[in-house]
Image (cartoon, helix red, strand yellow):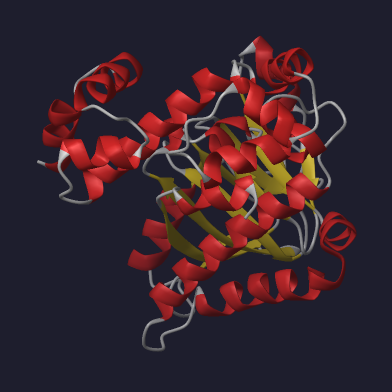
Amino acid sequence: MDVVTEVLRGVRLDSQIWGRLELSAPWGLQMEGLKESAFYVVTEGSCVLQIETQDPRVKHLSAPRVLQPGDLVILLQGYSYRLSSLNSTEKEALPAISLMEVLEQSASNHQTTSYNHYRYGGGGDETHLVSGCFFFCNRQRCPLLSALPTVIHLTQKHIHEATGSSAEWFTSTIEFLACEATSTQLGAPVISSRLAEIMFIQVVRTYLAKLPDHEQGWLRAVVDPQIGQALALIHQHLNHSWTVEELAQRVDMSRAAFAAKFRQLVGEPPLQYITRWRMQEAATVLQQNNLSVVDVALAMGYESESAFNKAFKRCMGETPGTYRKKTTE
């Protein structure tokens, strides 16, 4: 099993569908920074997305980007942003209002054409969007989520180039989601939520398949033939007493070369990475079931509870018992 699959298995992902937006030019929607990760699928027409940030480290994100039919964009960080009609001048454009306000006003003024189906704008060329958000319960502890870029923008060209024969299924997922987002049939909210989760995994797979050359860190490590193989071994056999020598041998590298390359790509030494990931897995186990601390320690490859307690506190800032009590109350 590959390392991305192993990591995704531990991601606690939920989603909420805001609905389908039918927007007519000129229009402008504003979204203040959210804790959630928003997504938009363009099903008809075009629009402009602009991230609003003064942070010099991500200033490049503020450049306007055009979203075309079939495009999908996920905004993983909590920056404010604006969506607007294409080629609208400041004089023409309606004042940008909150997306949440549009949803609330449309519902109260009966401007919904069906369940979760909203209209807004000045009556010109139309753009249709399906929108929603993702919730990641353990985001800060997941190397994959931490490594993904702030904005993932996939065009139909990207999808077809990266996924090949499975591109049709990716597109079908998006089309099915667009349909269920406004459906009044039984179970539609659950179906649309699950489809959104499938779509997220497909987005990750597509992004990794066409990883930009400038991308470094954990994502580059995952697709590296040797370090990616080592990461897969670590995640598949987390309770194994790994040594740097054994990992290097398993991927046909010298110990020194392996240790240097692992640290360069992953950002920390192999054994430190293993310990941190073990503690993150242990935290999930402590939160989700009733295993004793001793049993959790054994499952993570520790021979004594005291050694596990010390490692857990060093990594998580508190003892396993305290962590369990705080997260399950």
Left or right of 262? Residue 311 is left
Residue 267 on image: x %, y %: 63, 17
Residue 70 on image: x %, y %: 77, 64
Residue drawn where x is 81% and y is 39% of the image: 225
Q: How many dots with numbers?
A: 0
Looking at this view, is 185 or 4 the one in front? 4
Residue drawn where x is 73% and y is 75% of the image: 169
Give the position of the C terminus as an image quadrant. top left
Looking at this view, is 314 or 134 the one in front? 314
The picture quadrant where one finds residue 106 is: bottom left
Residue 200 on image: x %, y %: 59, 56
Is residue 228 visible in the rendered image? The answer is: yes
Residue drawn where x is 63% and y is 43% of the image: 232
The picture quadrant where one finds residue 14 is: bottom left
Q: Is residue 28 above or below residue 23?
A: above
Left or right of 98? Residue 127 is right
Looking at this view, is 25 or 213 the one in front? 213
Residue 204 on image: x %, y %: 66, 50
